[in-house]
Image: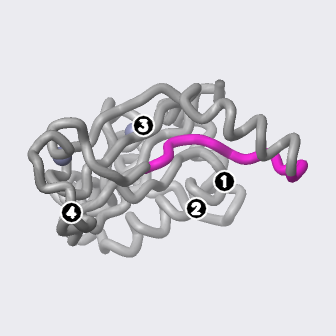
Amino acid sequence: MAEAVTMEKAVGALQKHGYRITPQRTMILESLLGASDHVTAEGLYEDVRKSYPHISFSTVYRTLELLRDSGLITQTDLGGGRWQYHPADKADHHHLICQRCGAVSTVPQEIFHDVHTHLQKKYGFDALMTHYAVYGRCAKCRGDGDDSGTGESE
Ligand SMILES: [Zn+2]
Ligand SMILES: [Zn+2]
């Protein structure tokens, strides 16, 4: 599995791209790496803004983009119209998202093991299979009777 994403690594990635390590950026990294659950750019922004009211949303967003491009964090659409971020080492799972009730559940990484093997064998493609969002309908909603159509997704 991915190595731990440390503060040092995150700082190193930013510096490598010519970013200055400001107290605001340090705080973005701290809340991101310290979070046990997914975080959104909006959530981080609100967090950091409490201490640094003048920080701009684009500072937060660009920091996240750079960390994503450096492979240190994952960016996943879990519905609700917001990207969710995880440090790469905490992203060893996938999510099942019900398009009807919005329930999000977590399944282990191995669930796509066969798909990975298949892609490799058949297409010679080494898929990066971390932190997928799989859309569909949860067991509870499937049991509700109305199985016509696709249901309402946003
Ligand atoms: Zn996750
Ligand atoms: Zn559901």
59 on left or right of 39? right
30 on left or right of 120? left
Magenta range: 123-133
The residue singled out by tag 2 in the image is 66
Task: Tell me whether the residue at label 1 lies in contact with that at label 4, contact meaning CB atoms closer than 8 angstroms.
Answer: no
148 on left or right of 26? left
The residue singled out by tag 3 in the image is 33
The residue singled out by tag 1 in the image is 70
Place of residue 102 in the rendered image (x, y in percent of width and height, measured from the top left): 19, 52
Q: Which callout, 2 or 4, points at the residue further toward the start of the chain?
A: 2
Q: Amino acid at mark 1?
A: Ser
Toward the viewer: 80 or 18? 80
Task: Tell me whether the residue at label 2 lies in contact with that at label 1, contact meaning CB atoms closer than 8 angstroms.
Answer: yes
Place of residue 115 in the rendered image (x, y in percent of width and height, measured from the top left): 68, 40
Q: Which callout, 1 or 3, points at the residue further toward the start of the chain?
A: 3
Queried on whether the Cβ of the residue with tag 1 lies below 8 angstroms from ligand 1, the answer reads no
Task: Tell me the quarter of the image containing the N terminus.
Answer: top right
**3D distance between C-alphas at marks 2 and 1:** 6 Å
Q: Amino acid at mark 2?
A: Leu
Q: Which callout, 1 or 4, points at the residue further toward the start of the chain?
A: 1
The residue singled out by tag 4 in the image is 148
